[in-house]
Image (cartoon, rainbow, N blue to C red):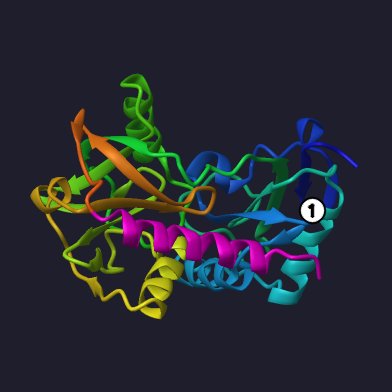
Amino acid sequence: MWKNVGYYNGAIGPLEEMTVPMQDRALYFGDGIYEATCAVNRVPFALEDHLDRMYNSLRLLEIPFHLDRQTVTGELQKVLDAAEDAPTHFLYWQVSRGVCMRNHPFPPAEVQPSLLIYVKPIAMKPKDKRYRLISLEDKRFYLCNIKTLNLIPSVLANQRAVEQGCDEAVLHRGSRVTECAHSNISILQDGVLRTAPTDELILPGITRKHLLALAREHGIPVEERPFSMTELMNADEVLVTSSSALCIPAESIDGIPVGGRDPQRLNLLQEAYWEKFQRETQPR
């Protein structure tokens, strides 16, 4: 077993010793998709949801990936099982269009997509964590609903947040809030959970999907429609969701305090999500 485990097209070993061919299209085009989740007791959380999104992203990018769900699940589990014990593991995988000479058009049909996986220990964000955010104009392209490897705008946005001592950057196109650099964002306002619709401007986040379902289960109305920066700044609570943080409230945006006015519903959603996470990652 290894602390950090790597996998590439069937080869497995210590992550630090694994290599990827120089002609993998992920390296020079970012031509691929990825998924990530956390695992407890070596049980990946919400794996079926992640596989659904993975195959949809592959379809949208026209990548002819031939491994079925059962095979992919087995390979992911193989990497998880090769990792040293840890309270929580981070499980990442990506599929590129394959290995061939650099050329913009798709490679010949005989070129097979490549599967890369890695596992490392991770510490989940505590429930009492509160994020500090900055706001930035969203300069990404119009395929944000596909979980591609093309993440440079998000990398730059998150770097700006780090430079200002913040945890995340909330992005907006004009006045419309879209999402964060690597998270979805929602608001609680007047007892309603509101989040942007899953159009081409945001990623259909798995944690976002779960949060909406949990809100409905607990009698909190849900609205999937755009909201503005003004509405964000005046919301009763601002909720940031991602696979490694689940549901974290924001305490400030651009140094201005936000939220803190609906702790009861916030706590209800956080507790419901943690209960779901713990229940669904019990040993099988």
Q: Is residue 103 left or right of residue 260?
A: right
Which of 67 and 260 lies nearest the eye of the viewer? 260
Q: Is residue 166 left or right of residue 138?
A: right
Which of 184 and 256 lies nearest the eye of the viewer? 256
Q: Which residue is mark 1?
A: 80
Residue at disc 1, secondary structure: helix
Query: Where does the C terminus fall, quadrant-wise?
Result: bottom right
> Dot 1, crowdedness within 10 Å: few (<14), some or many (≥20)?
many
Image spot of residue 28 (x, y percent): 52, 40
Kindly identify the amino acid type of the residue bearing the numbered disc 1: Leu
Task: Say which residue appears at 42% left-offset and 69% top-offset.
Answer: 209
Which region shows up in magenta?
Answer: 262-284
Image spot of residue 63 (x, y percent): 54, 66
Task: Say which residue appears at 83% left-offset and 45% top-offset.
Answer: 83
Image spot of residue 92 (x, y percent): 64, 50
Residue 271 belongs to magenta span: yes
Whether residue 152 can be seen here: yes
Which of 68 and 87 lies nearest the eye of the viewer? 87
